[in-house]
Amino acid sequence: MVVGLTGGIGSGKSTVLNEFKLLGVPVYIADVEAKHIMNTSLVVKEKIIALLGTYAYHNHQLNRKYIADKVFNHKELLAQLNAIVHPAVHQHFKEFVAKQTATYLVYENAILFENNSEKLCDKVIVVTASEENRISRVIKRDGVAKEAVLARMKNQWSQEAKIKKADFVIQNDDILILKEQVLKIHQELIEINL
């Protein structure tokens, strides 16, 4: 069984994911794997260079700042980049799933609903947190201004929209309560598969 894990920026998806890892659940982090594929797949590299130019790579590594600057306010260019990367990630994910023997695995994807990846999942968990906590976490993590965080939030679905499509919701404002929620969902997912 594939369990999608998503949530808005700063909701604490990584913290939740680590709790599942501690329970021995295999995890697939779409963003990490996408970056790996963009750096290692010659086919993907060639397509990105054709789309964004040779500056998309620096010393054979993805030039993330250059790419972010190019696509941030250009939805069409971002869509074209996603059309290159997402199919490669989906194929890699299918291969990952085929190798698993666990009762379920967690597929973490920040834009699960935005790119229709929920279709790959049997169940979906949405991680939420107060806006105040989300903003302060991102400022601390990325060293950016509040306005930059709010701009990123506007580019994602709202928490409310994600919650409507969720099978499970984890409120991530308190680490102790978080651990209890993860354990409860873990037990439910195991029971579903029995």
Image: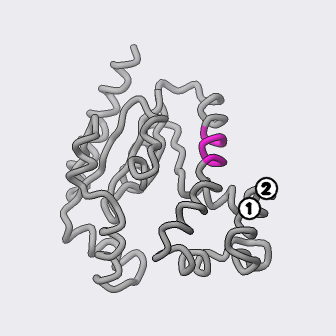
Q: Picture quarter containing residue 35?
A: bottom right
Q: Residue at x 29, y 50 (%)?
A: 127
| Camera-nearest residue between 32 and 25 | 32
* Pick the front one: 76 or 153: 76
The amino acid at mark 2 is Val
17 or 94, nearer to the observer: 94
Mark 1: amino acid: Lys
- Mark pair 2, 1: CA separation: 6 Å
What secondary structure do most residues of the magenta stretch adopt?
helix
Residue at the far top: name it.
194
Percent position of residue 119, x then y: 45, 35
Which residue is the site of mark 2? 43
Q: Tell me whether circle 2 and circle 1 mark residues in contact (CB < 8 Å).
A: yes
In the picture, measured across the screen, residue 70 lies left or right of residue 38, that is: left
Residue under the point 42% across and 39% down: 118
Tell me what residue is drawn at x 54 percent, y 81 percent: 69
Q: Is residue 146 magenta?
A: no
The residue labelled by disc 1 is: 47
Image coordinates of residue 8 in percent, x first then y, are 32, 59
